[in-house]
Image (cartoon, rainbow, N blue to C red):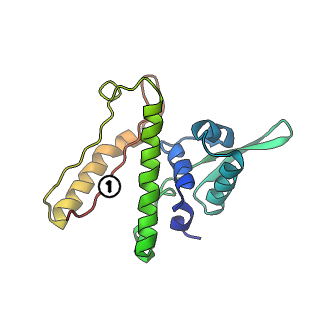
């Protein structure tokens, strides 16, 4: 089963998003992060992600007679590569984009439900811009953005650091 087959589900995409930032999480941690997902459903989707090589078990320990596993998202496992993307149908791309957008909406809704919402204070933003670029200029922009983001993606949790989700969508405009 390819990465796309595993990732093209809104709950599995949310689970993968919970691991962004090189996080190690147990299913108990995931239950706290995704309280709206029934426990049996969460376990089933975590098992599918492990079977699809999207999540890795990094440790196991006994807790009250059962085994608690700690998982991580290997670098690159939470995305569909260009070769696999080229094999997807239009409907599969639509489904994947829908899962991505649904996860983004759910993240924003959880932020809004926190109660103490101040987009300015929290540095929350969303915007859209139209750029006129040749393919070469776009490749250059993507390379430059990668260079800007790379050192920040390596940051570990520390005092004063808040986990933030940075999402991008890039497509031709009509």
Which residue is painted at 47% across and 44% down in the image? Answer: 106
Q: Quadrant of the N terminus?
A: bottom right
Position in image of residue 152 (x %, y %): 37, 39
Task: Please tell me whether residue 72 is drawn above or below residue 157 in the rendered image.
Answer: below
Helix, strand or loop at label 1? It is loop
Q: Quadrant of residue 162?
A: top left
Q: Quadrant of residue 59?
A: top right
Position in image of residue 104 (x %, y %): 42, 47
Which residue is painted at 61% across and 57% down in the image? Answer: 49
Is 38 situated left or right of 113 in this image?
right
Which residue is painted at 36% across and 41% down in the image? Answer: 151
Which residue is painted at 54% across and 59% down in the image? Answer: 9
Task: Please tell me whether residue 112 is drawn above or below residue 128 in the rendered image.
Answer: above
Position in image of residue 109 (x %, y %): 44, 39
Within 10 Å of disc 1 (Cα), the crowding (few <14, some 14-19, many 20+) is few
Is 168 situated left or right of 12 in this image?
left
In this view of the protein, which residue sits in the foreground, 7 or 115?
115
């Amino acid at each position: 089963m390819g990465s796309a087959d595993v990732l093209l589900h809104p709950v599995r995409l949310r689970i993968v998003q919970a691991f962004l930032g090189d996080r190690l999480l147990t299913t108990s941690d995931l239950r706290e992060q995704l309280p709206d997902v029934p426990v049996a459903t969460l376990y089933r989707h975590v098992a599918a992600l492990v079977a699809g090589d999207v999540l890795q078990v990094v440790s196991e320990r006994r807790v009250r007679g059962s085994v608690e596993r700690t998982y991580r998202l290997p670098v690159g496992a939470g995305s569909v590569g260009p070769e696999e993307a080229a094999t997807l149908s239009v409907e599969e791309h639509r489904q994947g984009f829908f899962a991505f957008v649904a996860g983004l909406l759910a993240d924003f809704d959880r932020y809004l439900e926190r109660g103490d919402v101040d987009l300015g204070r929290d540095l929350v933003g969303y915007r859209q811009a139209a750029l006129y670029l040749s393919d070469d200029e776009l490749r250059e922009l993507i390379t430059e953005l990668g260079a800007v983001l790379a050192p920040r993606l390596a940051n570990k949790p520390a005092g004063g650091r808040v986990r933030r989700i940075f999402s991008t969508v890039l497509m031709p405009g009509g």
